[in-house]
Image: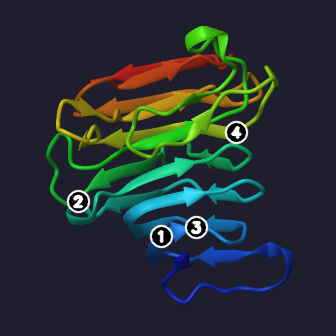
């Protein structure tokens, strides 16, 4: 059951607003704007089809490591996380150790070449989400001046991990600029097909 805690202001087409503090959890049911401030990311937070998550500069999310947290933007969902050089958007963890949480994952509808020529495939991240489609210009939103720390949680039998940032069949309409993957396990960035391009990506 989806929910946004922190007593957000709700109403009309503006959707929910988190203004300085709160908890992001579950599947978002309405367009959500997160203002500058400090927030908790609890569990697998999903941005589903038709929903937009907007994150303003200076927002920091601390993932709760005890409940397997991650942020996933599903096919047809959008994220606009546009930080600035002086006020980046930061995703970190409460434990501050590599592999604490699942990081940020986008699933798109851009073309892929899957096994046996299939146009769709099932994600390898434990979420079992299909990705891939026929739209090379698919738009999942934008990530600018975003830092993801301590990602790469082990999944399944422990032989695989998620990444700091993962892009499944993300389209060319999506903007990825000035990103930092810091102290994660596995990959800083992993791209499964798609047509997206990135600019100024740093993995540490």
Residue 137 percent location from the top left of the image: 81, 24
Q: Nearer the viewer, residue 80 or 195?
A: 195
Q: Residue at x 70, y 39 (%)?
A: 140
Q: Residue at x 68, y 43 (%)?
A: 75
| Residue 52 appears anywhere in the view | yes
For label 2, the crowd category at 10 Å Cα-Cα, with few meaning under 14, some 14 to 19 and many 20 or more, is: many
Q: Residue at x 52, y 20 (%)?
A: 192
Q: Earlier in the sequence, mark 2 or mark 4?
A: 2
Residue 16 percent location from the top left of the image: 67, 77
- Return the residue at label 1: 24
Residue 155 percent location from the top left of the image: 26, 42
The residue mark sitting in front, 3 or 4, is 4
**Marks 2/4: CA distance?**
26 Å
**Marks 1/4: CA distance?**
19 Å
45 is higher (above) or lower (below) than 147: below
- Return the residue at label 3: 35
**Marks 2/3: CA distance?**
23 Å
Q: How many marks?
A: 4
63 is higher (above) or lower (below) than 22: above
Q: Residue 35's quadrant in the figure?
A: bottom right
For label 4, the crowd category at 10 Å Cα-Cα, with few meaning under 14, some 14 to 19 and many 20 or more, is: many
11 is higher (above) or lower (below) than 151: below
Q: Secondary structure at mark 3?
A: loop
For label 1, the crowd category at 10 Å Cα-Cα, with few meaning under 14, some 14 to 19 and many 20 or more, is: many
Q: Earlier in the sequence, mark 2 or mark 3?
A: 3
**Marks 1/2: CA distance?**
14 Å
Q: Earlier in the sequence, mark 1 or mark 4?
A: 1
- Return the residue at label 2: 65
The residue mark sitting in front, 3 or 1, is 1
- Return the residue at label 4: 140
Q: Residue 150's quadrant in the figure?
A: top left
**Marks 3/1: CA distance?**
12 Å
């Amino acid at each position: 059951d989806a929910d946004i805690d922190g007593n957000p202001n709700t109403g009309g087409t503006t959707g929910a607003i988190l203004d300085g503090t709160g908890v992001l959890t579950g599947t978002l049911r309405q367009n959500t704007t997160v203002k500058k401030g400090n927030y908790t990311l609890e569990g697998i937070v999903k941005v589903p089809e038709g929903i937009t998550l907007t994150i303003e500069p200076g927002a920091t999310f601390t993932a709760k490591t005890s409940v397997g947290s991650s942020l996933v933007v599903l096919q047809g969902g959008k994220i606009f996380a546009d930080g600035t050089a002086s006020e980046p958007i930061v995703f970190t963890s409460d434990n501050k150790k590599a592999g604490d949480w699942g990081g940020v994952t986008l699933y798109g509808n851009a073309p892929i070449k899957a096994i046996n020529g299939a146009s769709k495939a099932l994600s390898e991240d434990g979420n079992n989400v299909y990705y891939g489609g026929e739209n090379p210009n698919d738009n999942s939103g934008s990530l600018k001046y975003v830092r993801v720390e301590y990602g790469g949680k082990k999944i399944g039998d422990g032989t695989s991990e998620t990444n700091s940032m993962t892009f499944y069949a993300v389209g060319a309409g999506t903007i990825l600029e000035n990103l930092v993957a810091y102290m994660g396990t596995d990959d800083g960035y992993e791209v499964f097909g798609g047509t997206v391009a990135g600019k100024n990506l740093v993995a540490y």
